[in-house]
Amino acid sequence: MSVRTPSGSALDPGHVTDDAIRSTMTNCSRGEAHRMRVPEWVHGSDPVHGVVGWRDPKSPERGWMLVPLGEAVVGLALRATPGKGVRTTAMCDLCRTTRAPGEVSLFVAARAGEAGRKLNTVGTYVCSDLACADNVRVLRPTPTLKPDPGLSISEREAALRERAAAFAEKVLASR
């Protein structure tokens, strides 16, 4: 199944191109989207059915997330607040995984459109590595990674998609 991005290009699961990803970005300039570094593993991902997130290795404070939202995929530019993340054990607001100290960070996203140009942002605490999609698939808790207890992997994945979509809607709210 192919999904159309906000700019109208196709985003096919398992065959994601840099241009298709860049066309999903809703809260950054075209120049920022053009400078975005897309890791190779993202090209084989499925942003149509799940959340995909990564940090930019050349700009560590920068993060990117692809979120399925209705019939489209929305790309979000994120910025981590300075520092080494939350200093105590903390829970990610998106995947609801409890992480070791320093493994959850506050990320902010500029609102889309005019509000973002006026420097209005939305923030949430997210896994520092933006690997929420991998974290909800953990079968057994580890000392540093404890997924939402009592839920199956498919229930955790669905809940992650819902919470990520709600965050994306907050970013897009002023558009």
Image: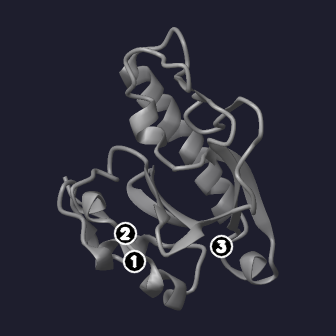
Location of residue 8 in the rendering, given as x and y in whole percent from the top left corner: 34, 76
Task: Tell me the kind of residue under disc 3.
Answer: Ala
Q: Which mark is residue 109?
A: none
Q: Quadrant of residue 4?
A: bottom left
Q: Nearer the viewer, residue 94 or 103?
A: 103
In this view, 138 is above or below 51: above
Q: Nearer the viewer, residue 18 or 91?
A: 91
**Which residue is tagged 1?**
23
Question: Residue at left 70%, top 70%?
Answer: 110
**Which residue is tagged 2?**
5
Question: Residue at left 46%, top 68%?
Answer: 57
- Identify the mark nearer the N-term, 2 or 3: 2
Disc 3 packing (10 Å; few <14; some 14–19; many ≥20):
many
In this view, 167 is above or below 27: above
Task: Tell me the kind of residue under disc 2.
Answer: Thr
Q: Secondary structure at mark 2?
A: loop
- Identify the mark nearer the N-term, 2 or 1: 2
Q: Which quarter of the image is occupied by the C terminus?
A: bottom right
Evaluate if marks 2 and 1 touch, with contact meaning CB atoms under 8 Å apart.
Answer: yes
Location of residue 137 in the rendering, given as x and y in whole percent from the top left corner: 38, 28
Task: Tell me the kind of residue under disc 1.
Answer: Ser
In this view, 107 is above or below 144: below
Disc 2 packing (10 Å; few <14; some 14–19; many ≥20):
many
Q: Determine the CA span between mark 2 and mark 3.
A: 15 Å
Question: Residue at left 59%, top 79%?
Answer: 28
Q: Secondary structure at mark 3?
A: loop
Q: Determine the CA span between mark 2 and mark 1.
A: 7 Å
Q: Is residue 131 left or right of residue 81?
A: left
